Image: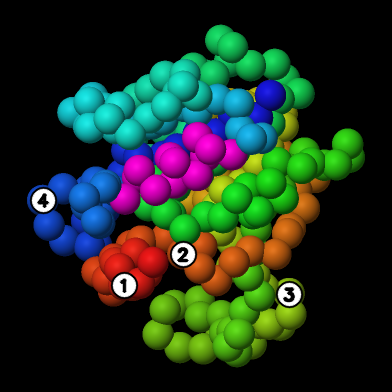
């Protein structure tokens, strides 16, 4: 079974306004509805678990389908939100199932990319889409001066969704309790720290996360142009 977790508990403050970015409307639909539709219609996704505050759940349910298995409580950071969802999923998943972690504010994720993510080889514990770096990349230890030049061919920008073997990924997250989990910034970090075998696949330029007003306007133009 392939289970998608949609993270919709964030506040999205960088975009401004008085509501989280994933609930801003584009063409009379909240942003979260776009990724929900893709996952709902995808033939390889069997169940959907959504992390969201109770306030927003009635709105979300207007756009959900038969695959929704339930809602999970947001945590104090992204990774604790994921862990809350994983522990709820544990009631109906097996250790060899695949869990897909997706951002509610990533509305352009394609059916093809989802298929590539969940197609784990027997030796793989997870997969994540990445993009190569186009610009020269530098390291700064103090945030104001260049410390060293990084090899561009060895540096990649991660995207979502990320797919993992459910049982191993749940264990990797629990191993970080109570404090280290608060330091995680990306969904794949717990897996890497646990030594899991995570492969990279080619991401998509259009699979951007809506973070700023510029991103929002870019998506609006895409919807308007069909």
Label 1: element kind? helix
| SS at mark 2 in the image | loop
Residue highlighted by disc 2: 208
Q: CA distance from mark 3 to mark 2?
A: 21 Å
Q: Residue at x 37, y 52 (%)?
A: 105
> Which quadrant is home to the N terminus?
top right
Magenta stretch: includes residue 13: no
Mark in front: 4 vs 2: 2
Report the side of 165 relative to 19 (left or right): right
Residue 92, compared with residue 80, is above or below; it is: above
Which residue shows up at 72% across the image and 20% down it? 95
Disc 2 + disc 1, Cβ < 8 Å: no
Judging depth in this view, the residue of 191 and 142 nearest the camera is 191
Tell me the element at label 4: loop
> Circle 3 is placed at which residue position?
154
Q: Quadrant of residue 211?
A: bottom left
The residue indicated by pointer 4 is 18
């Amino acid at each position: 079974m392939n289970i998608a977790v949609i993270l919709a508990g964030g506040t999205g403050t960088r975009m401004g306004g008085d509501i989280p970015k994933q609930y801003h409307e584009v063409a009379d639909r909240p942003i979260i509805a776009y990724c929900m539709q893709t996952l709902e219609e995808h033939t390889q996704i069997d169940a959907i678990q959504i992390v969201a505050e109770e306030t927003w759940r009635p709105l979300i349910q207007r756009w959900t389908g038969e695959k929704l298995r339930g809602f999970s409580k947001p945590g104090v950071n992204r990774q604790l939100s994921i862990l809350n969802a994983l522990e709820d999923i544990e009631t109906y998943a097996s250790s060899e199932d695949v869990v897909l972690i997706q951002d509610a504010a990533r509305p352009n994720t394609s059916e093809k990319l989802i298929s590539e993510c969940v197609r784990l080889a027997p030796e793989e514990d997870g997969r994540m889409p990445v993009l190569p770096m186009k610009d020269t990349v530098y390291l700064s230890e103090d945030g104001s001066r260049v410390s060293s030049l990084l090899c561009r061919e060895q540096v990649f920008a991660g995207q979502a969704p990320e797919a993992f073997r459910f049982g191993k990924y749940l264990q990797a997250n629990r191993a970080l309790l109570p404090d280290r989990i608060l330091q995680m910034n990306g969904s794949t970090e717990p897996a890497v720290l646990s030594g899991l075998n995570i492969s990279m696949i080619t991401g998509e330029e259009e699979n951007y996360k809506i973070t700023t007003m510029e991103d929002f306007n870019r998506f609006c133009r895409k919807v308007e142009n069909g």
